[in-house]
Image (spheres, grey):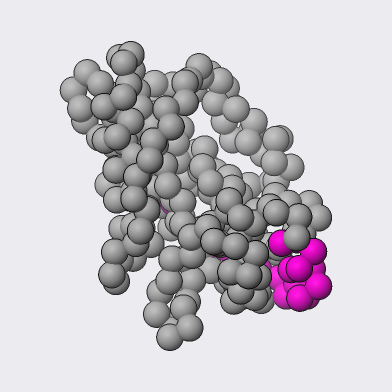
Amino acid sequence: MIGLEYKLLPVQVDETPLPDEGGLEYVRRIAESKLRSATRDAAAVGLVITADTAVVGRGRDGRTEIFGKPRDNTEAVEMLQRLRGRTHQVQTAIAISTNQDGTILFDGCTTNVPMRYYSNEEINTYVAGGDPLDKAGAYAIQHAGFHPVEKLHGCYANVMGLPLCHLTRSLIKAGTHPKTDVPQACQAALGYNCPVYSMILTGNTQENVSS
């Protein structure tokens, strides 16, 4: 949707949260770890982009908890039950570096996500299909059959895993301009009338934490 040519650089990093680590601190640390691993493997000169996304909610003890990918169907059901009928946050960090000078640009996005009160039967049907096992928080917002989120007012692309307007403004800072109208392409592809894209691109929104 950005219109740029790219190559994939698979990396493996330890994604275990540290004790008392906040969501934004966690995703930024993992995005940077991915970046440093990827730049070691990147042969061509150019931009290297990494990102990490976490679902952040309240744990059983009331403290902030980072919801990763469920280990199995049982944990997926448990996660979805704990998220049901409540609002949690999806937090993403983007890290960009150039091989020329090693400068790293960071950007971040936080989106409040209100979950509808879906039934146990809906949970079991969704989990049985296998979709939750590779998803942080055990759900995909775009899943038409389950449709777990209601009345989202923030960045839809962030909840899917990569906030494109945040990426766009970071790319521009790095000297690379997308070849498409990114907000238009994103909204058309997702079927979502985004209320925050102009604020994101101008840096004037609470759905943004950057440094």
Above-or-below relation of 78 to 157? below
Residue 66 in magenta?
Answer: no
So how many labels did they put on this image?
Answer: 0
- Which residue: 46% across, 57% down? 54
| Residue at screen point 27% across, 47% down | 211
For the magenta stretch, what is the residue range?
107-127
Question: Residue at 18% across / 23% down in the picture?
Answer: 101
Q: Quadrant of the N terminus?
A: top right
Say if 187 sits above or below 63 in the image. above
Residue 81 horizontal side relative to residue 23, left or right:
right
- In percent of width and height, residue 85 lies at 66, 76
Is residue 116 among what the camera can see?
Answer: yes
State whether residue 205 appears in this view. no
Farthest residue to the left: give it: 101
Q: Quadrant of residue 103?
A: top left
Instruction: Note whether 70 is above or below 64 in the view shown.
Output: above
Q: Residue furthest top?
A: 44
Front-most of 36 and 76? 76
Residue 26 appears at what percent x and percent y?
34, 57
- Is 119 colored magenta in this rendering? yes
Q: Nearer the viewer, residue 94 or 59?
A: 59
The quarter of the picture where residue 97 lies is top left
Q: Where in the figure is residue 192, as x and y percent of width and height?
A: 70, 46
Percent across and percent down for residue 124 are 76, 68
